[in-house]
Amino acid sequence: MPYADVNGTRLYYQDVGTGEPMILIPGLGLDHTYYALGVPALSAELRTIAVDLRGVGRSTKDEDVEYSVRLWAEDIALLIEHLGLAGAHVLGTSLGGSIALALAARHPAKVRSLIAVGAFSELNLSVELNYSLRKRLIAKLGMSEDVADFIALWIMTPGFLESEAGREVAANIRAGVRENSPEIYRAFLDAILALGRREPGGAVPPLTAALSSITAPTLVACADNDHFIPAELSALIHRAIPHSKFVEVSGGGHIPFIEAPDRITREVLDFVRALGNA
C-alpha cells in the first residue's frame, strides 16, 4: 500500500499515471476519492498523486496535534520530498485549495504550478457562520446522518442533487463525512476558522497577506453557481497573486470535480499544457 511516514504521521496516497507529477489535495474531511472522476483524464497526461490528508481516510487520525492549514501544508511538502520529487504541480479544492496556497507560499521551490479550485485564504461572514454552525451541530449530534445531510446540502447544488448521479454522489459524500471522528472533525473546523475573517478596516488575515509572495504559475478557478464558497473569495485570491489566471467553470457547484469533472479537468490540463509551451 502507498503510505509515506512524514512529519510524525502516516499519509496514504493513490499514485496513478506517468509524466509530470501533480499532487491532488481534497476538501474538508473527504479522502482521495474526491478526485475519482477527474483522475482518469488527468492521469492520461500526468502522474497524479491523490492524498488522504492527516486525520482523514487511510491516513493516521492523529488526536494529539493542533490541526492547521500550515500543518497540512508541511505534511504535503514532506510528502513531495519523500517521493523524491524536485517539485510538483499542486491542485487543491476548497480546504485543499487553502492548503495548496499555504504550501506555495511557504515552499515555492516545491510547487511547479498551483491550481486552487473553490479555495479560500480567509472567510467571509456566511462561510464563518456555516463552519461555526457545523461545529455546534457536531457537538450536539456527533457525525450523524443529520450533520452529513447538512454538509451535503451546502456543497452540492440543488439541480445536481435532483439528478441520479447527484443522488449517488450525495450518498457517497454523506458516508465519507460520517467516517470522520467527531472530535477530529471539530479540530478541522477550528483549523479553518483560524484563517480568520477580515473586519472592516481590520488587519488582512495571514494567509491572504502571504499570497503576494507566491511565485508559481497559478490557476484560480471556481464555479459560477457555488452557493457555499462564493466566487468573490476566489477573485480575492486572484487579485492577490498578480500573475494568476482566473476562470469560472459553468455549473460546477462547490466541487467541480464532482459536478463538472470534464470542464474542470479540461481547464487544468489546458493550463498545465500551456506551461510546457511557454
Image (spheres, rainbow, N blue to C red):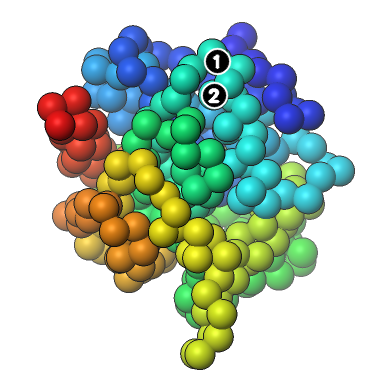
Snapshot quadrant of residue 83: top right
Q: Callout 1, which amino acid?
A: Leu
Q: Is residue 47 above or below residue 68?
A: above
Q: Is residue 197 above or below residue 219?
A: below
- The residue nearer to you, when weighing 137 against 39, is 39
Q: Are marks 1 and 2 in contact (CB under 8 Å)?
A: yes
Q: Position of residue 87 (x, y in %)?
A: 44, 25
Residue at the spot of label 2:
80
- Binning the other alpha carbons within 10 Å of mark 1 as few (below 14), some (14 to 19) or many (20 upward) gives few
Q: Quadrant of the C terminus?
A: top left
Q: Is residue 47 visible?
A: yes
The reply, left or right, for residue 113 in relation to residue 99 is left
Q: Residue at x 58, y 33 (%)?
A: 76
Snapshot quadrant of residue 253: bottom left
Q: Quadrant of the N terminus?
A: top right
Q: Position of residue 193 (x, y in %)?
A: 63, 66
Q: Secondary structure at mark 1?
A: loop
Q: Callout 2, which amino acid?
A: Ile
Residue at the spot of label 1:
83
Q: Position of residue 148 (x, y in %)?
A: 57, 54
Q: Position of residue 89 (x, y in %)?
A: 37, 30
- The residue nearer to you, when weighing 31 against 220, is 220
Q: Secondary structure at mark 2?
A: helix
The residues bearing labels 1 and 2 have C-alpha atoms spaced at a distance of 5 Å
